[in-house]
Amino acid sequence: MSSARELALAPLPRSLTVTACGLVLAMIAVLARAAALASLGTGHPQLITAAATFDLTVTDSLVAWWMLRREFGWSARALVALFFGSMMVAGLILPAGQEGALWFMHVAVAPLELLLIVYLFRRIAKARRGAVARRSAAGGLDVQDMILGATSEIVGTGRFAEVLAYEISVLYYALARRPGSDATFAPTTEAGETGAGNSALTYHRQSAYGPVVVMLALVTLAEIPALHLFVRTWSVPAAWICTALGVYGLLWILGDWRACRSRLVSIEDGALHIRFGLRWRLDAALDDIVGVRAPTVDEEMTKGAVDLKLALPGASWRILELDRPVVARGPYGIRRTVRTLGLGLDEPDRLDAALAATRPDAEDPTPA
């Protein structure tokens, strides 16, 4: 009996929880729109429409917050954001001419919107001061880590903060005039030197990723208008959605390439700090790296030869074997436990020398 109770109370996997939440919200939206449409043939259409508006705003917000708060670490502040977001969605779901109750709701919460704007500006200013202080204290903090710290101060720690930080990082590296780094993760100069002394290791110079980026950018630029005109024959909103996704894809391609040039691999304080474009970041102590070797032919051809492969197209890479698992952090808060790591570097001998320095009595880790 107790085991059945524990099974019933056990939380669902995150994917199932998100899927179940989406199905419940979709069902509420369909029922609310159907009720609003059917209300035109009744004697009290305003009352039924008001009830549908209430379900699309208040009920949807409560259901989404209750079902997802544990999975994404949402606090009560997230409920306010969900409510304002649901009001925007309700305007798209309600039939034209039946948004009267929603309009009154917008008027009623207008003071709350002003307070929320003031609150956000205060939090943003505080987060900015905190980021500057952390950068000065650390002497060199990765830009994306700084953005994550700022978003965590604004919206609280959790998956939502990591998603927001990642999206801001994409825009920063894609649009910033010079997406510079700090003393540790300094960009390389035209002469091939880094601004971080001997601690920074590049990984983009001996790869074919630059031409790949140019090709993908040209193809995307050609596809965006063609796809827009094609989808427009069926739906204008869908066409603009496809265009927005295409523009975002172009920004991601550019941002990832510029991040690969700015976010480097570094060896500092007895640890290997890996910041690989906009994709993955992890830190591993040099003492935990028990082996470095070149991959065999079979390993180069096998997709799952290592737990995580960080190498740009066309770059040679090596396999790092770790004594204990390390957690790698990816886009949108994705985590992966790593024991074997494939890492491509322009100058792998510098990593070999750093590992040899930590083990003066060990054999030379340089692969044959």
Image (cartoon, rainbow, N blue to C red):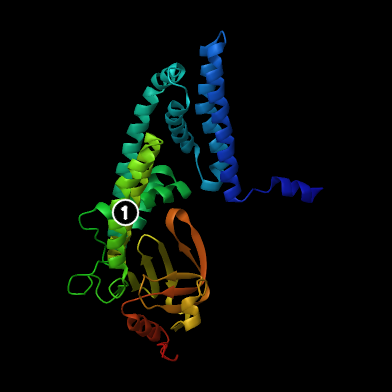
Residue 169: x and y, percent?
A: 33, 53
The reply to whether residue 126 is visible in this rendering is yes
- Residue 183 lies left or right of residue 348; in this view the side is left
Regarding mark 1 in the picture, which secondary structure is present there?
helix
- Residue 346 lies left or right of residue 34; in this view the side is left
Residue 282: x and y, percent?
A: 43, 66
- Residue 34 lies left or right of residue 352; in this view the side is right
Instruction: Tell me which residue sits at (52%, 17%) in the image.
Output: 49
The reply to whether residue 149 is visible in this rendering is no
Q: Which residue is mark 1?
A: 220
| Above or below 219: residue 207 | below
Query: Residue lying furthest right in this view?
Result: 1
Asked whether 42 or 333 is in front, the reply is 42
Instruction: Tell me which residue sits at (31%, 56%) in the image.
Output: 219
Please tell me how many numbered marks the rendered image carries.
1
Q: Quadrant of residue 203?
A: bottom left
Three-letter code, disc 1? Thr
Asked whether 356 or 54 is in front, the reply is 54
Instruction: Tell me which residue sits at (29%, 42%) in the image.
Output: 125
- Residue 135 lies left or right of residue 279; in this view the side is left
| Above or below 122: residue 249 | below
Q: Quadrant of residue 347?
A: bottom left
Q: Quadrant of the C terminus?
A: bottom left
Asked whether 325 or 127 is in front, the reply is 325
Residue 317: x and y, percent?
A: 40, 77
Residue 175: x and y, percent?
A: 25, 52
Q: Residues within 10 Å of mark 1 (few under 14, many from 20)?
A: some
